[in-house]
Image: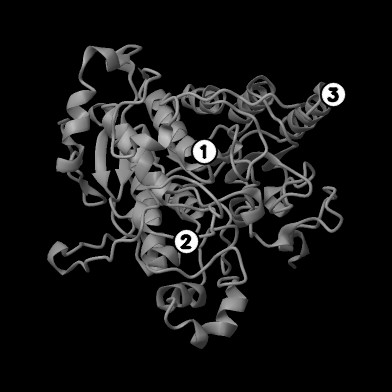
Amino acid sequence: LPRHATDGHGSAFGSLPTSTHTQPLRIIMTATTAITTSGSTANKQRVSYFYQPDVGHFYYGPSHPMKPHRIKMAHHLILSYGMYRQMECYKSHPASPSEMAAFHSEDYINFMAKVTPDNLRGFSNAMNRFNVGEYTDCPVFDGLFEFTQLYTGASLDGAVKLNRGDCDIAVNWSGGLHHAKKSEASGFCYINDIVLAILEMLKVHARVLYIDIDVHHGDGVEEAFYCTDRVMTFSLHKYGDFFPGTGHIKDTGAKEGTGFSVNAPLTSGMTDGTYEKLFKPVLSKIMEVFQPGAIVLQCGADSLTGDRLGCFNLSLKGHAECVKFTKSFNVPTLVLGGGGYTIRNVARCWAYETSVLLDMELPDEIPYNDYYEYYAPDFKLHLTPEQRENMNTEASLESVRVDLLTQLISLKGAPSVQMMEVPPDFEVIKEDLNAEKERKSTKEDRDGEGMNDGGSADDRRSGKGKTKDGKGDRKEHEAELAG
C-alpha cells in the first residue's frame, strides 16, 4: 500500500483495498495489464483522492436516472487498475449542517435534515417551497441528508487540502452537483458542494476559476457568484430547449461580476475536435486575464457519447483532454464529478481521468473487478463516438469563440483583493465509529441498465428553468433583478 498521511480533515484511508478488492488487485499486477507512468517524477503533481465507502449505496428510486452506484463502480476501476498506489487516499468526513450553512439557508438545511420517506405528509408545504418530492426531479429517498453530507464533506476536504498546500490536485468523483440553489433543490442536486468548496478556497485565494464540462449549464454555481469578480465561471453546455434553460452567451455577470460569467452555448453532436477548438483558446485567455489562484473543474460525464440524457458525442479522450489541458497550468485544482447517466461509461470516464491526473497510461482492457460484467460485451475502457451529425457548425462555433474572447479581452486585468487574516478551516466532526449507525443496504441494481433507469423519457427535471419558447432566448438573471 502507498504511504498515507493522517489529517484532521479526512482520516487516512489506509484500509482502502479491503478483502473484497484483494483478488482483483492481484490480477492486475500481471504483465498484460501493466500500467506505465509517463513524465518526470520530480515534477509530478501531488494528487489526493477522497472517497466515502457508503456514498454509492444510496438509491434515488427505481425510475430515476441518477444512480450513485456509478461512484462505487468508478472507485473499483481505480482500485483494480492500481491507481491508488500513485495518490494519497482519504476517507472524507461527512459535512455538518453548519458547514452547509456557509451557502444554503438555515430553513432549507433544517428541512433536508428532517424529511424522510416516512414523514413526507408533514412537509408538503416545505417540499413545494424547496422543490423536493414526488412531483419534482429531486425525490426524498432513504438516507437523503446523509448522502448530501458525504459528497459535500469530500469536496470540502479537498478544498482544505489544497488551501494548506498539502496537494496539487484533489479529486472527489462523488461531488460536482452544480444545480442546487441557496434554498432549492434542482436537477437531481440538493446541496451545492461546489459553491461550498469555492467559498472555502476563497479564504486563501483571491480568485477562483470554476470550469464546467457537464452537458448541462452550471446554473447553481453561476448564480451563487454572479455578482462577484473573485470567482469566474466557465461553462460549456447544450443550450436551447434543454434543462436548465440558462447559460446564454450574453449572461456575463452583474454588478462587480460583470464579465466574469463565461458561457459557451452549444447544440447537439459536439465532437472531440470541435470541443477542443473552443475549450483551449477560451481557457487560455481566461488564465491570462483572470489569473486564478485555484481552479474547480466539474467533469460531468453526460457530455460523453451514448449518454442516456446527454446529446454530445465526446469520447473519453476528448472529455479528458479538457482535464489534461486544465492540469497543464499547474494551478491548485479541485476535480469533481457531476452528471452522467449511462453508468458504465461514467465509471470508465472518471477512472480514465484519474489516470490523466496521475500521468499514467492505462491498458484498454478493463481488469477484473466486482462490477466487471457491466462493461460487456467488449470489456474495453475507451468508447467509440456514434456516427451522428454534429449540429454545431464551424460558423456557429467561431461566433461563440470570438464573442467569448472579446468578452475576456474587455476585462481590465485580474481583480485585486486585499487579503486579511486567513479564516480558520471549517470545524471537523470527529466520527465515533462505534456509534455509527449501521445502514440498511439497498439493491445495487447489478442486473445492468434497462427500462426506467435513465432513458431520455425518464428525465423528470422540471421545465421551470427552460426559456419561454424553448429556442434559447436570453432570460433576465435573478441577480439583475435584485435591487
Residue drawn 40% across the image and 49% down it: 69
Which residue does the image show at 79% across and 46% down from the upper left?
240
Asked if residue 28 shows in the view, the reply is yes
Q: Mark 1 vs mark 3: which is more N-terminal?
A: 1
- The Cα atoms of the two marked residues, 1 and 3, are separated by 27 Å
What kind of residue is marked 2? Tyr
Circle count: 3
Q: Residues within 10 Å of mark 3 (few under 14, many from 20)?
A: few
Residue 23 against residue 175 in the figure, above or below: above
Asked if the residue at tag 3 contacts the one at tag 1, i.e. Cβ–Cβ closer than 8 Å, the answer is: no
Question: Distance between the Cα atoms at labels 1 and 2?
Answer: 21 Å
Q: Position of residue 72 (x, y in %)?
A: 35, 45
Q: Which residue is mark 1?
A: 299
Q: Position of residue 278 (x, y in %)?
A: 69, 25
Mark before the other along the chain sequence, 1 or 2: 2
Could you tell me the amino acid type at mark 1?
Answer: Cys
Q: Is residue 95 left or right of residue 465?
A: left
Image quadrant where residue 368 sits: top left
Q: Position of residue 221 (x, y in %)?
A: 58, 52
Side (left or right) of 374 relative to 184? left
Earlier along the polypeptide chain: callout 2 or callout 3?
2
Looking at the rendering, in which quadrant would you find the N terminus?
top left
Query: What is the basis of the colouring in this image?
Result: one colour
Q: What is the C-alpha distance between the residues marked 2 and 3?
A: 41 Å
Q: Where's the C terminus, which quadrant?
A: bottom right
Amino acid type, residue under disc 3 in the picture = Ala
In the rendering, at what x and y percent does residue 318 appear?
A: 57, 24
Question: What residue would you read off at disc 2?
Answer: 60
Secondary element under disc 2, as helix, strand or loop, is loop
